[in-house]
Image: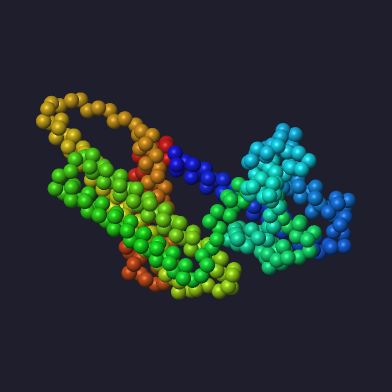
Amino acid sequence: MRQKKLQELDLRRITAQKRFIKLANLLGAAFIWHCDNKPSLMLLLTGVYSTQFSKQAILEAEIAIIGVENWKDDLEASCCMLCYASFSLVNRKHHCRLCGSIVDSQPLSYTGKSPCSAQVPVSILIKMLPHLNYLPELKKSWNVLCDADTTDAKLSQIFSFRCCKTCKNLLTYNSKPLKNEEDDVKFIFTSYDQFLMLKQLISDLERRFCAQLTTNSGSDSQLLKLRASMVDSIKELESKVSFFKSRVSMLVSASSEAKGTTNHSQQVLEMNMYKAMMLFICEAVQRLKKMNDATENAISSSAASKDSSTFSLPEPVLPRLSKREIRERREELMVTKEQKFLVEELISNTRKLRKFDEVTTLEESKRDLEQRIEELEEELGEFRF
C-alpha cells in the first residue's frame, strides 16, 4: 500500500515537472518577445493589440498545457479546494497553472496559515531546477531569464504564473543540488558503501545456497527462499546503481552550468564505479540462472524419490505458467535484455581502449545472456513482450 502511494506521488511529481517545462518555455518566449517590443507593451497587457503573446493567447496555451478536462470551471467552484474557504469579493478565485485547480490567495495575516496559492516568478524556479529539459531557445537566454525578477515590474509579471502550494511542493521536492565538491565526494563514497554491502549480501546468499545444495541439508522451501532473497538483492542493487547514474548525471549537468567546467577525474571514477557494479550484476544474473536450474533439478529429484518410495502414479500434465511465473519471467527477461545491452556497450568501449584481453570474457557473458533470453522467450511463448 505504501509503495503504491509512493508511485502515485512520483507520477504526480513527474506530471508537474513536465507541465512546468512547457509553461517555462511559453512564458520565457513571451518575456523575450515583450523585452524586444517594449513600445507596445501597454497595449499588449490591456489586450488591445492581439498577438501570439497576448494575455488571451497565453491563457489558452496554459489551458492546453494542463488539458481542458483538468481546467476546473469557475461556476462550479464555491470554495477553495485546499482550505475550503468560501470565495467572495475579498477572497477571489485563482486557477493553478500546473493542475487547473481553483484556489484562493488569502494573505498570512488573514488565515494564520500559508496562502493556498501565489504568483510565483519563473526565474526563481528555473534557478532551483536547472537540470530540466528546457528548449534550446530558453537556455540561450538563460542569464536574462534568471534575472527577470529584478527587471521592470510589468515585465517580471509576464514571467510568472499562479501556482498552488501543492504543486509548488511537488515541483520543488528534493530540488536543491549538492552545494560543493565535498558533498559530491560524500555522495559517491556513501553510494559505494551501499554497493559493497549489497554485493557482500549477494555473495553470502549465493554461498549459503551452494552449501545447502551440495550437502543436501536444506529443504526445497529453504532453497526457494534463498533464491528469492538473492533476486530481491540483485534488483535492489540494480535500482541503486541506476539512481547513482541519474544523480551523477544531474550533478555533472548542474556543475557544468554553474562553473562552466567539469571534474574529469571524478567523472572517470564515477563511470568506473558504474561499470564495475553493472558487470557484477551481469555475472550475478548468470549465476542466478544456474541457481534456478539447480533448484529445479533438486526439486524434481526429491519429488521423483518420493514417488518411487510409494507407488508410481500416472505422470500429470504440466500446467501452463501461472500469472506469478509469467511476471517473474518477464522481469527476468527485461533485466537480461538490459544486461545484454550494457555488456555490448562495455565490449564497444573495451575495444576502443584496445583492451582485447577483456573482450573474450565479455563476449562469453553476452552469449550466455543471449541464450538465457531465448530460453525465457521460449518459456513465455505468447506471453512475452
Colouring rule applied to residues:
rainbow
Name the image quarter holding residue 69: top right
Residue placed most toward the observer, 272 or 247: 247
Image quarter of the C terminus = top left
Outermost residue toward the left in this view: 309
Q: Position of residue 9 (x, y in %)?
A: 53, 45
Q: Position of residue 119 (x, y in %)?
A: 71, 52
Judged left or right of residue 104, residue 273 is: left
Judged left or right of residue 337, residue 288 is: left
Q: Which residue is drawn at 14% across and 48% down?
A: 215
Residue placed most toward the observer, 135 or 240: 240
Q: Which residue is drawn at 57% across and 45% down?
A: 12
Q: Where is residue 299 in the image (x, y as percent from the top left)?
A: 21, 39
* Location of residue 381 with respect to 31 vertically, above or below: above
Judged left or right of residue 42, residue 144 is: left
- Can see residue 338? yes
* Location of residue 81 with respect to 44 vertically, above or below: above
* Location of residue 261 with respect to 369 vertically, above or below: below
Q: Where is residue 282 in the image (x, y as percent from the top left)?
A: 35, 56
Name the image quarter holding residue 259: bottom right
- Can see residue 367? no
Q: Residue at x 79, y 49 (%)?
A: 57
Task: Say how many tags the image has.
Answer: 0
Residue placed most toward the observer, 132 or 333: 132
Image quarter of the N terminus = top left
Judged left or right of residue 70, residue 304 is: left
